[in-house]
Image (cartoon, rainbow, N blue to C red):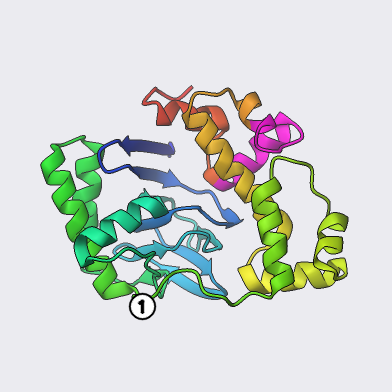
């Protein structure tokens, strides 16, 4: 079966619509900088997120907060058909203010809503974005969906909570601020004033992902933005902190399921290479 991956960016809503058909890929531990709201159309997947395990099937909805680390793979050997919307945090803040009157980042309490009645609302909005339908309709569908999600699946508390030790938060900030540079575990260990193993263990306990995985995911997310702006894969790799293009391509494909060039072509609305 041929895998197809389609991405449409809606300039009005400032969201991305993804549609994957016939996907067999196992996605390793990673996260996204945006909210992800999606659903399974076909296939059965095993999801690991925030330290918990979930078995998903058609009709189940995926709800990821920014930087929720997760892995996903088939649990029956069958291909996956899947749709999702990627919503940046600033877009979510504006939308939440529109529907409930105050600005904050909502926090989805659980990453999976089993057999959710909202799947049809999400499908309708997703299709309207993919088909580039009228602005009025899309905007109405979008705000209705956001209101439903906030009321049903969030705890109505700000997303960021102080639950990480200061040294680990310092390491995370250092990775956020310096990902384009070469970073060693030695330097992180010195920064946190703890040995390497303790650093790795505490970082993983705090964020559900190792420092190396966190760093590489930040780099891939930054590279995606550069590819969307039209930079070449080589330029995106170098400006995102990857030491060589081959390593960049391997890691990018392991997380996104596409090569950097394929991602760029799809985002531009071009045919696959």
- Residue drawn where x is 42% and y is 62% of the image: 44
As drawn, is 169 to the left or to the right of 3?
A: right
Q: How many marks?
A: 1
**Main SS of residues in magenta:** helix
Residue 132 higher or lower than 27, as above or below: above
Magenta stretch, residue numbers: 237-255
Q: Is residue 245 magenta?
A: yes
- Residue drawn where x is 44% and y is 38% of the image: 3
Q: Nearer the viewer, residue 117 or 78?
A: 117
Q: Nearer the viewer, residue 212 or 101?
A: 101
The answer to whether residue 82 of the structure is visible from this angle is no
- Residue drawn where x is 35% and y is 58% of the image: 37
Q: Position of residue 249 (x, y in %)?
A: 65, 34
- Residue drawn where x is 27% and y is 56% of the image: 95
Q: Position of residue 272 (x, y in %)?
A: 44, 25
Q: Which residue is mark 1?
A: 155
Question: Image quadrant of residue 108?
Answer: bottom left
> Which part of the image, by quadrant, shows the N terminus?
top left
Residue 112 higher or lower than 220, as above or below: below
The answer to whether residue 44 of the structure is visible from this angle is yes
As drawn, is 129 to the left or to the right of 243?
A: left
As drawn, is 82 to the left or to the right of 135?
A: right
Q: Position of residue 63 (x, y in %)?
A: 38, 64
As drawn, is 229 to the left or to the right of 108?
A: right
Residue 197 higher or lower than 262, as above or below: below
């Amino acid at each position: 079966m041929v895998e197809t991956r389609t991405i449409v960016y809606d300039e009005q809503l400032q969201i991305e619509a993804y549609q994957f058909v016939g996907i067999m890929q196992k996605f390793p531990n990673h996260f996204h900088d945006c909210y992800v709201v999606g659903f399974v159309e076909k296939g059965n997947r095993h999801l690991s997120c925030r330290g918990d395990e979930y078995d998903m099937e058609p009709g189940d909805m995926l709800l990821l907060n920014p930087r929720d680390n997760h892995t996903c793979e088939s649990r029956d050997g069958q291909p996956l058909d899947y749709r999702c919307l990627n919503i940046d945090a600033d877009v979510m803040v504006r939308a939440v203010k529109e529907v409930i009157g105050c600005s904050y980042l909502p926090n989805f309490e659980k990453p999976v809503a089993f057999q959710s009645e909202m799947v049809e609302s999400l499908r309708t909005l997703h299709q309207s974005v993919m088909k580039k339908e009228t602005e009025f309709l899309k905007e109405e569908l979008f705000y209705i969906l956001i209101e439903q999600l906030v009321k049903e699946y969030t705890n109505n508390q700000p997303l960021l909570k102080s639950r990480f030790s200061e040294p680990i938060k310092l390491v995370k900030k250092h990775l956020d601020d310096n990902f384009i540079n070469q970073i060693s575990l030695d330097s992180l260990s010195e920064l946190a004033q703890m040995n390497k193993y303790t650093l790795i263990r505490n970082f993983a306990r705090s964020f559900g992902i190792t420092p190396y995985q966190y760093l590489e995911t930040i780099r891939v997310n930054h590279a995606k933005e550069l590819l969307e702006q039209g930079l070449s894969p080589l330029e995106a790799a170098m400006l995102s902190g990857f030491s060589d293009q081959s390593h960049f391509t391997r890691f990018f494909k392991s997380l996104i399921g596409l090569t950097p060039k394929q991602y760029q072509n799809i985002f531009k609305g071009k045919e696959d290479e």
